[in-house]
Amino acid sequence: MTATDSFQLAFRTVRGNKLRTGITVAIIAFGIMALIGIITSIQAMNQSLKESFSSMGANAFSIRYKTNIRFGRREVIKTVRKGQKEKTSNLNKIIRREDAEYFKENYKFPALVSISISGPGNLECHYLDKKTNPVSQVIGGDENYLAVNSFTLDAGRNLNNVDVQSGRNVCLIGSNVAAKLFSTAPEKCVDKIIRVGSMPYRVIGLLKSKGSSGFQRTDDNIVTSYNNCRRLSNVSASYGIGITVDNIVQLDAAIDEATSVFRAVRKLTPMDADNFIIEKSDKFAELFISFLSGITGSAAAIGMITLIGAAIGLMNIMLVAVNERTREVGLIKAIGGKSKNVRQQFLFESLIISLMGAFFGIVLGVLVGNLFAMFLKTGVVIPWLWILIGIAVCSLVGLLAGIYPAMKAAKLNPIVALRYE
């Protein structure tokens, strides 16, 4: 009796006990589905975060005020340098408009500087009898805002210094807004008067699509000047400063210069710690991704707990199978089969069931995870490493669950087994 014969017998037995096999496969598949589904979703979130927070480019950084908000176990503040003193009053000290404008005027490094502020969100935009969904957000910027944040114009013009200084009601609209309000010819939105919430704005430019993710909807934004935006309600208390250099090699030098200038803006002494934060464009992405890594560990724990339960259930089923097929084992030995062949048959059965569970669990997990990826509008995500880990773990579960029943079956006395009722 060869190993092939043992495998064929095991496969026939698995196929013949459909209910028992189906229940065990479902238990294993649920554990693998939970593991692969959560991992796939997390990878989709990671991809979305990288796309969202890379909008400023690798050669850009931003300045914001220091806050004591915590994300997970990490605090989003700079470490105080040795010899410097951190003051409690420095936390949550916002960047005022005067601070941002002073910095822009006095920052002499060859780089583009942009001042911005976040305005109200979840607004409807109206033009004649057409309106958008309540998803638009007003962003206040200046003439450098588009360049620093990697926006390009599809039609019309950019904000100019007069628009910024006067704060007049002019705006640039995202491609989704234009498509909703000017469906037949979005490029004809220029010089039209639209209402953003309850405020009338003259459209001076149309922004090219940058794509959206679950975390940023840049194509639904309305960009106006920061002097206009600050007159609206529900506006951020603090201004943001974005800086971009022509060459990434200059980035560290630009950051050092920005630190020096902004410390002067804040009137800090050499012994005072910075009461602001300078972050590269991918900083938030790295922060959230590290936070999500904890969820990956939780997902692995959930999957392993389920698989341990499945292994116990599979071993119990295989032990029951040994008792039910005692006469079959006796017959195999009577016609020349060896204890090795009996062990192989029961191990093959256990492996077939566990690998079937792995297959269905992986397929369902990838499908569930990619439904989430579709929501985030990222590409298809397939976690190959975790798929291989899932297959390996299920194979191990099958072996461990089948070893004891197989050894028990192999030790049966053929004469006693043939007489078993």
Image (cartoon, grey):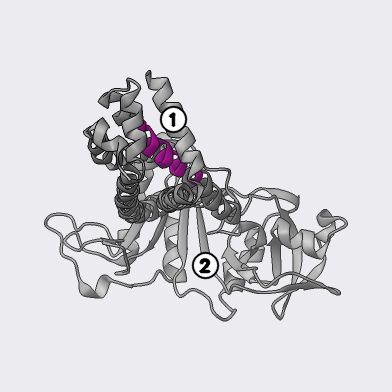
Magenta residue span: 345-360
In terms of depth relative to the viewer, which is nearer, 287 or 384?
Answer: 384
Q: Residue 114 vs residue 271: left or right?
A: right
Horizontal and vertical percent position of residue 69: 32, 69
Horizontal and vertical percent position of residue 243: 46, 51
Q: Residue at x 44, y 42 (%)?
A: 358
Q: Is residue 393 above or below residue 167?
A: above
Q: Residue 145 vs residue 419: left or right?
A: right
Instruction: Tell me the quarter of the picture where residue 335 sits.
Output: top left
- Determine the secondary structure under disc 1: helix
Looking at the rendered structure, the kind of residue marked 2 is: Ile
Disc 2 marks which residue? 117
Q: Which image quadrant: the N terminus?
A: top left
Dot 1 or dot 2: first in sequence order is 1
Viewer-nearest of labels 1 and 2?
1
Label 1: how many residues lie within 10 Å, few (<14), some (14-19) or many (20+)?
some
Looking at the rendered structure, the kind of residue marked 1 is: Leu
Q: Label 1 vs label 2: CA separation?
A: 71 Å
In terms of depth relative to the viewer, which is nearer, 274 or 372?
Answer: 372
Residue at the outermost front position: 419
Residue 102 appears in the rendering: yes
Q: Residue at x 28, y 66 (%)?
A: 267
- Residue 352 is one of the magenta-drawn residues: yes
Task: Identify the mark at residue 9; answer none if there is no mark.
Answer: 1
